[in-house]
Amino acid sequence: MDTTSGAGASDPNGGEGSSSATGGGGGGGSTEGGSTAAAPPSRYESQKRRDWNTFLQYLKNHKPPLTLARCSGAHVIEFLKYLDQFGKTKVHVIGCPYFGHPNPPAPCACPLKQAWGSLDALIGRLRAAYEENGGRPESNPFGARAVRIYLREVRESQAKARGIPYEKKKRKRATVTAATANVSIAATATADVGGGSSAGGDGGGSGEAAAAAAGATPTVAPPTTTV
């Protein structure tokens, strides 16, 4: 409903641009009107708007109802737990025979939850939307320490339950660091070779100057004849 209303609000703007272009007359007017028309929101912006409206609706339906000004990190965590009922990621419990199995061979009765990556991206969008709607960064509940700790616990628990390691990025950074060191060593060696060549070039230049000086034709005085 919110998305539809937002799209409907953008339609009158497009109509005004077309009417102004028509009033200007000519094909150039329509081109100008098309260039000044507001571009549709990106997929990220649309998703961020939907997430923000969903959170506001959650606060409204909360018992007792909550205002955005009174919202804290604890309420954000409650919202994330509330979203688990709509999750599609199988998270095995400790007693499940497929606990820690990345590809279980058969279905099980373990619950479906929101994946850690989805929750992490959601918090990023809501954190940005909070400040875009007038909230102060220092009081942003989506950036609270409790929320970061909760997301870290979800990541670690799901990694163990699903058998999915999350340490690949660290190994990649180590590889990149080693490659950078090798490039630095190669660059230093190249600079040393270049310095030797330039020194050799200076010596060659002085040798050429000496050869030119040695090859210069000396001035000889004309012979004198004694009578």
Image (cartoon, rainbow, N blue to C red):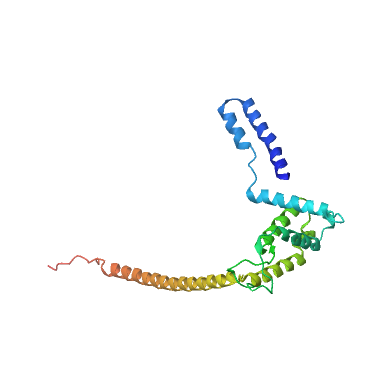
Q: Nearer the viewer, residue 158 or 227?
A: 158
Q: Position of residue 152 (x, y in %)?
A: 70, 69
Q: Position of residue 153 (x, y in %)?
A: 71, 70
Q: Where's the N terminus, which quadrant?
A: top right
| Quadrant assignment for the C terminus | bottom left
**Rendered residue at 36%/69% (across/down):** 201
Judge left or right: residue 75 versus residue 196: right
Left or right of 176 in this view: 19: right
Q: Visible in this render: residue 21?
A: yes
The front one of 98 and 201 is 98
Residue 200, picture quadrant: bottom left
Query: Residue 210: where, in percent of width, then height?
Result: 31, 70
Where on the picture, by quarter, is residue 193?
Answer: bottom left
Quarter occupied by residue 17: top right
Q: Residue shown at 67%/71% (left/top)?
A: 156
Q: Give the residue displayed 70% in from the left and 38% down from the top.
A: 8
Residue at figure coordinates x 62%, y 26% from the top left? 22
Examine the rendered structure and indicate whether residue 135 appears above or below residue 4: below
Q: Nearer the viewer, residue 93 or 65?
A: 93
Answer whether residue 132 is visible to the viewer in this image. Answer: no
